[in-house]
Amino acid sequence: MIEIERKYLVVSVDYKKESQKNNRIVQGFLNTDPFRTVRIRIKGDQGFLTIKGNGNEKGTTRFEWERQIPVNEAEALFKLAEPGSIDKMRYEIRVGEHLWEVDEFFGENEGLIVAEIELKHEDESFERPSWLGVEVTGQSKYYNAQLSKNPYKKWQH
Amino acid sequence: MIEIERKYLVVSVDYKKESQKNNRIVQGFLNTDPFRTVRIRIKGDQGFLTIKGNGNEKGTTRFEWERQIPVNEAEALFKLAEPGSIDKMRYEIRVGEHLWEVDEFFGENEGLIVAEIELKHEDESFERPSWLGVEVTGQSKYYNAQLSKNPYKKWQH
């Protein structure tokens, strides 16, 4: 129930050519507080309820609890969500022994593309694909919960 | 997923004599907002995750989604809860064709005893037991989520 992840910006669209799979994801939040984030996710015909705790100092590890739920229940819960939702396409890209998840955001977060890798250990090494930009691990403004309230298009670029 | 309930204060402890069953319940909240209440309940060796929406005008009906979860997961999620928790003994009392749930609160809510009945229809009639006091249906200060933040002992009596 502890997730170890690192997050990066993406600097080119080359990840699309290397992707084996993509899925549209829509998310709403019953709480966006980083200490007790409650997320409703609809991914195709699947629903998920996810609860996350606060991260460690570096932002690499975070408590995460997730349960798949019927999509009609996820849709009902989505209606209770706070104003502001997340709409994105998720691309899965296998690089070496790791799976990268690249999220291309739409709507109020259009223009933002973020890559995440899940690790088994905090210090685990991994191959860096050509399209990987700067690391943003632990920067809370890139948390989806924060993006739902303060979306990318409103940032001072 | 719509619950119809009425809630009353309790004026004597006679309900204990009529009770067939009681359980200690501990609850924490990942959100106390009445529009999107997220509750973690530990009841003996059972865990529950419950999400409630806003009630109707009279407070008799409310959207409710509940899932039983392993008690160790409930305990882990309880650690993420907002400050303030609920500790109570729940007595079940069958009166005629209905089941009353009487909650005797402890800790910061000691002194408060509340009875709830679940109905199939808003206008359904039911037998009133001798220990039943005034109705408090829809009064948000009696919601457990609100009691966790503004407990009974702090009220102006």
Image (tube, coloured by chain):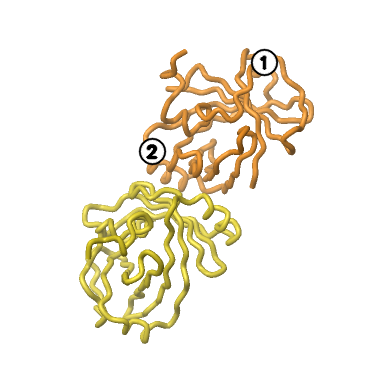
Chain colours: A yellow, B orange
On residue A142, the disc is: none
Mark-to-mark CA distance, 1 and 2? 33 Å
Amino acid marked by disc 1: Trp
Amino acid marked by disc 2: Glu
Quadrant hosting residue B58: top right
> Left or right: B78 with respect to B114?
left
Residue A13, above or below B103: below
Q: Earlier in the sequence, mark 1 or mark 2?
A: 2
Residue B15 visible? The answer is yes
| Place of residue A34 in the rendered image (x, y in percent of width and height, measured from the top left) | 33, 50
Q: Residue shown at 54%/53% (left/top)?
A: A79
Residue A101 visible? The answer is no
Q: Nearer the viewer, residue B50 or A24?
A: A24
Q: Residue shown at 38%/52% (left/top)?
A: A52
- Give the residue number, with chain letter if any, for mark 1: B131
Quadrant hosting residue B44: top right
Q: Nearer the viewer, residue A32 or A118?
A: A32
On residue B82, the disc is: 2
Task: Tell me, yes or no, whether dots 1 and 2 are on the same chain.
Answer: yes
Give the residue furthest to the bottom. Answer: A17
Residue A1, above or below B89: below
| Place of residue A109 in the rendered image (x, y in percent of width and height, measured from the top left) | 35, 65
- The secondary element bearing badge 1 is classed as loop
| Place of residue A75 in the rendered image (x, y in percent of width and height, measured from the top left) | 56, 58
Q: Give the class, few, some or many, for how many residues have Cα within 10 Å of label 2's Cα (few <14, many ≥20).
A: some
Residue B96, above or below A74: above
User: Which chain hosts label 1?
Assistant: B
- The secondary element bearing badge 2 is classed as loop
> Left or right: A29 with respect to A73?
left
Q: Residue shown at 51%/48% (left/top)?
A: B70
Q: Residue shown at 49%/42% (left/top)?
A: B37
